[in-house]
Image: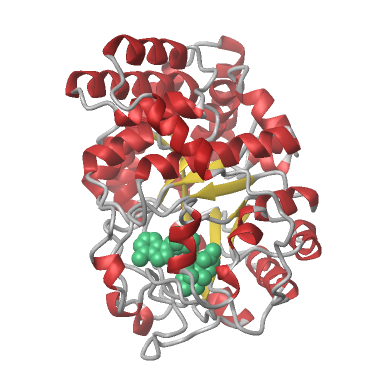
Amino acid sequence: MKQDNTLGQGLHNFVDEATIREEMARFENPDPGRIREILAKAREKQGLDPDEAAALLRNKDRDLDEAIFETAITIKKAIYGNRIVVFAPLYITNECKNRCQYCGFKASNKELDRRTLSSEEIRAEVTVLEDLGHKRLLLVYGEHPTLGADWIAQTVRDVYAVTSAKSGEIRRVNINCAPLDVDGFKQLHEVGIGTYQCFQESYHRPTYEKLHHAGPKTNFLWRLHAMHRAQEAGIDDVGMGALFGLYDPVYEVLGLLHHARQLERDWGVGPHTISFPRLEPALNSDIAYNPPYPTTNHEFKKIVSVLRLAVPYTGLILTTRETAEFRRELMELGVSQISGGSRTYPGAYSDPEYDRPDVQQFCVGDSRSLDEVIRSVAGDHGYVPSWCTACYRLGRTGEHFMELAKTGFIQKFCLPNGLLTFKEYLEDYASEETKRIGEALIKNEVDNYPDPDRKKLLTERLVRMEAGERDLYL
Ligand code: SAM
Ligand code: SF4
């Protein structure tokens, strides 16, 4: 991977501090009438302006906060229904030449076991994940000191090449790796990645520069323009994020919204997903143990709710950093994708030696198995877990997907397709108890499906699945 100090020179900083400060100040003490007007606008599912998002976030009135949550729940239900997409992270390497102060993989952590998976080891990991029922993976990489885009592309090929018994194959590989140049992104596009994901960590440039003082990640603007370069290379599903706890959460949400707007302006489509990790304890990281801007659960719920209202058609991703109990609440408020049964160390799925908390990137808050997560998602909440990858495989990505999403497509296609993947999971991987709960949920969903023609198509495919067919979608 190229390390060049001229990278990023001349790039425009579209997350302007003065603008964000002005937007934050505009509604320092928002009056209740204004909050209600903003919520009324949000109910039209047209999104919010950054200053409106700031007003909601800065509201201190608990009753109005409840109204914000209620509105988020309504929008979430209206657009996404009760379907939730499930994935697993797969750590490929924890070697890293950066020194992000909050991360267990930072180069200065000499006592961390460094490991980069070989093709053989990737195969072993993917086989375990497939045998658990996963279909969607997020590959995660430290910024490896010597290996670049061609190696990352090879690891993606390695993953797609693994097929195991039952319906085992990975149908969508998303990537979370350091920013590449356009040629590098083209290599990832050519091997068929789904979403390219990269978190800005902090949109507040002085904070960013303080926390990233060595290695290529010091370059704020090069990272800020990563999604633009990915788009230029043809990757039209991009995922952004901020790491909460490093700086003022209101500033970070506004940074995300400005970033999203800039992508819309320049590429006609905003981010496919937004992630909002909260700092978790990590090896030798004071800041991870004592975040300078700790985000309370109440504030975090507001962040998720306000993002749901501000960018209603963008997927919101929640990982196992949060506890099982809290994940439940956040799903209702707006989260549309969750990870389950995650390990955050390369090799930890297939090699018990590396399945230890002390070697992980950070501590996970939800350590339940995938089967337990699915049972709870379906049984306790009545959500339909989905491993659907139909859109991506039919070329419904980027702007095309967003346009469809706005016409109720998610309910028309994503719900039945989600049910079909859930059926596949229950047939091939679920425990008896999960299967019992899941079958009851599918029956209920089919019975209540409003469109008779589509209901017929769905029922016919569910029967074909019971007879042994796999990978069916509408
Ligand atoms: N190395 C690549 C990078 O930095 O973009 C990608 C992989 S990095 C392992 C993925 C993300 O983990 C980072 O972008 C950061 O937001 C998050 N992360 C790092 N340390 C964390 C911590 N202590 N708690 C929660 N999330 C953390
Ligand atoms: Fe390396 Fe990414 Fe961790 Fe920073 S966040 S130390 S770049 S793995």
The answer to whether residue 115 is above or below residue 438 is below
Looking at this view, is 453 or 281 the one in front?
281
Residue lying at 57% horizontally and 56% vertically, measured from the top left: 198
- The answer to whether residue 337 is seen in the rendering is no
Residue ID at (68%, 34%) = 264
Q: Quadrant of residue 105?
A: bottom left
Q: Nearer the viewer, residue 327 or 466?
A: 327
Residue 406 higher or lower than 54, as above or below: above
Towards the viewer: 180 or 28: 28
Residue at 41 percent across and 80 percent down: it is: 351
Q: Is residue 268 left or right of residue 112?
A: right
Whole-percent x, y for residue 380 in the image: 25, 35
Q: Is residue 280 left or right of residue 153?
A: left
How many numbered marks have been drawn onto this rendered protein structure? 0
Q: Residue at x 63, y 58 (%)?
A: 221
For the N terminus, the quadrant is: bottom right
The reply, left or right, for residue 460 in relation to residue 35 is: right
Whether 251 is drawn above or below 147: the answer is above
Q: Position of residue 417 (x, y in %)?
A: 57, 33
The quarter of the image holding the C terminus is top right
Please say whether residue 245 is visible from this viewpoint: yes
Where does residue 369 sit, x and y in percent of width and height? 32, 58
